[in-house]
Image (cartoon, rainbow, N blue to C red):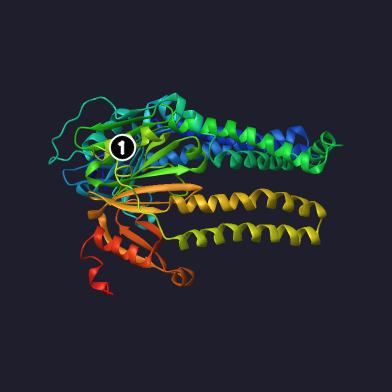
């Protein structure tokens, strides 16, 4: 591509260079602390550690900025009436384009450095699941004004002239933060913090001293009590971490319906995110109630929509979440509003229960899982130490009745129904999920029946769709019950494969 061919093309924002410089500086400082600690802890001199840290930092920062400079000079993009195109021309050449009519989402992200310099990352996608990111283009970064212009331009649909009020559908209620610790994230963060502390102490050569200090601190206290105290400390740390993470993710939350038929979610304290979902791609909603949230009367709302961007290993953003954990009444109201229904389909129908055989199946699964865990503790206890036998016995006293309660709760939560144009299904106990899926969005049925289900006259019916996760299941329904549900939900789709008794 010659210089004349660049006419009409735009470049990325040059402020990416100072952003990269500061980012690499932070990475260099983060790497310098354990590196210096490892060198000094291993008997090295302070000036040697200083030389390694400074030299390595300069190489890291300089190399990062130089690579970003080459990237900035090589990337061009343009928007034509039919396509969004990008080109990279430096040592080698590549070109990529998306048809504008296939573009389904334009998401904006800005971390604290991006916000400081007034830029943002724009991710444009078709919603396809092709490998290698073939259905996605990322412009990293452009100015904030250019990002908003691209979003408005690429999501404009000439055939939709509808306008809506400026009032948001939902805004952040600070009282919702009380639901943040009511999840399995809190203990996970607490245990991760403990593991991180042990790893850092190992880098610094202080792990043995740390362990000796903890043992001395709890000397004279029974081992089981000491373990419980450490778990309580980890839980407190996890709760603090969960609160901080929730604030970072959901501060300044706002859900809008924009002119042109687009739902827009904006959120984030330090890193801001703007996620767009076309209403014409909506096929339903899902109310998700993790056990802790359900006990405290909260639920979150996820969109079931076609062409939605999926999270990957590098990006953990929940692109389908319309509402964070909020009171159930608020969640059902938002579900109705986004679907333009007077009442949420998840509340508009009384769900049909499932046969009692499903209850026995759930009891066997939950209790059996606990028995396997206790058997592992027993075997290790006989082989290693009696402490594991004591811990296993204590777990058995707690987990066996809990497993029975969870199994009974899971059975009570099983249900399905049809209301208007929606198929509704519910299942789960640790994570209860209630989905409302448009019947017109079902493109196929999968009927599953394990050998254990077949003995009890049960089956699982899976509605296949191009939206959301791609499949929504009604678990452990009766054989006739499940097949009739599939036939009634989408007439003639399963009928040719049914044999009347």
Q: Find residue 33 and report its image quarter.
A: top right
Judge left or right: residue 293 versus residue 420.
Answer: right
Q: Secondary structure at mark 1?
A: strand
Q: Position of residue 184 (x, y in %)?
A: 55, 42
Using the rendered view, name the quadrant where residue 232 is placed. top right
Mark 1 surroundings within 10 Å by alpha-carbon count, few (fewer than 14), some (14 through 19), many (20 or more):
some
Disc tally is 1
Left or right, 286 with reference to 229:
left
Q: Using the image as rendered, state which of residue 277 and residue 155 is in the foreground.
A: 277
Closer to the camera in the image, 464 or 200: 464
Residue in the picture at 72% in, 57% down: 377
Residue 27: x and y, percent? 56, 36
Q: Is residue 96 left or right of residue 248?
A: left
**Residue 326: percent from left, percent from top:** 42, 33
- Mark yes or no: residue 24 visible: yes
Q: Position of residue 131 (x, y in %)?
A: 38, 57
201 left or right of 27? right
Q: Quadrant of residue 327?
A: top left
Pointer 1 residue: 11
Judge whether residue 205 can be spotted in this image.
no
Residue at x-position 47% and y-position 63%: 357
Judged from this view, the residue extending furthest toward the right is: 220
Viewer-proximal residue among 202 and 12:
202
Indicate whether 35 appears above or below 465: above
Up/down of 294 relative to 388, above or below: above
Looking at the image, which is closer to me, 382 or 399?
A: 399
Seen as rendered, the residue at the extreme front is 356
């Amino acid at each position: 591509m010659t210089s004349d061919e660049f006419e009409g093309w735009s470049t990325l924002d040059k402020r990416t260079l100072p952003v990269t410089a500061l980012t690499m500086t932070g990475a260099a400082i983060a790497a310098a602390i354990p590196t210096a600690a490892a060198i000094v802890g291993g008997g090295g001199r302070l000036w040697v550690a200083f030389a390694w840290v400074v030299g390595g930092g300069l190489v890291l920062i300089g190399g990062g900025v130089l690579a970003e400079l080459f990237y900035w000079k090589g990337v061009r993009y343009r928007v034509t009436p039919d396509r969004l195109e990008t080109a990279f021309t430096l040592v080698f050449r590549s070109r990529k384009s998306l048809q504008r009519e296939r573009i389904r989402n334009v998401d904006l992200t800005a971390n604290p450095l991006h916000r400081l310099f007034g830029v943002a990352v724009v991710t444009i996608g078709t919603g396809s699941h092709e490998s290698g990111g073939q259905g996605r283009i990322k412009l990293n970064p452009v100015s904030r004004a250019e990002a908003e212009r691209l979003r408005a331009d690429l999501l404009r649909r000439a055939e939709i002239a509808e306008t809506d009020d400026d009032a948001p559908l939902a805004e952040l209620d600070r009282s919702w933060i009380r639901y943040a610790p009511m999840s399995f994230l809190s203990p996970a963060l607490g245990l991760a913090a403990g593991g991180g502390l042990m790893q850092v102490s190992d880098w610094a050569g202080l792990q043995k001293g740390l362990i000796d200090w903890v043992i001395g601190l709890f000397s004279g206290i029974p081992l089981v009590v000491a373990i419980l105290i450490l778990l309580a400390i980890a839980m407190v740390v996890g709760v603090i971490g969960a609160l901080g993470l929730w604030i970072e993710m959901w501060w300044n939350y706002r859900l809008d319906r924009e002119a042109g038929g687009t739902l827009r979610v904006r959120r984030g304290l330090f890193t801001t995110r703007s996620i767009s979902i076309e209403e014409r791609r909506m096929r339903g909603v899902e109310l998700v109630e993790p056990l802790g949230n359900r006990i405290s009367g909260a639920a979150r709302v996820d969109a079931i929509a076609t062409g939605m961007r999926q999270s990957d290993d590098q990006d953990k953003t929940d692109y389908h979440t319309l509402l964070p954990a909020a009171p159930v009444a608020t969640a059902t109201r938002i579900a109705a509003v986004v679907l333009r229904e007077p009442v949420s389909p998840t509340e508009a129908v009384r769900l049909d229960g499932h046969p009692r055989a499903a209850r026995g199946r759930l009891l066997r699964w939950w209790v059996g899982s606990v028995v396997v865990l206790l058997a592992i503790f027993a075997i290790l206890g006989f082989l290693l130490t009696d402490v594991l036998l004591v811990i296993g016995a204590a777990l058995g006293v707690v987990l066996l009745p809990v497993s029975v309660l969870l199994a009974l709760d899971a059975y009570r939560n099983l249900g399905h129904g049809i209301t208007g144009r929606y198929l509704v299904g519910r299942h789960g106990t640790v994570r209860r999920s209630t989905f409302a899926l448009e019947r017109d969005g079902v493109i196929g049925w999968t009927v599953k029946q394990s050998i254990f289900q077949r003995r009890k006259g049960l089956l699982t019916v899976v509605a296949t769709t191009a939206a959301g996760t791609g499949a929504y299941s009604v678990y452990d329904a009766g054989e006739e019950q499940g097949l009739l549900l599939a036939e009634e939900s989408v007439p003639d789709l399963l009928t040719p494969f049914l044999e009347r008794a």
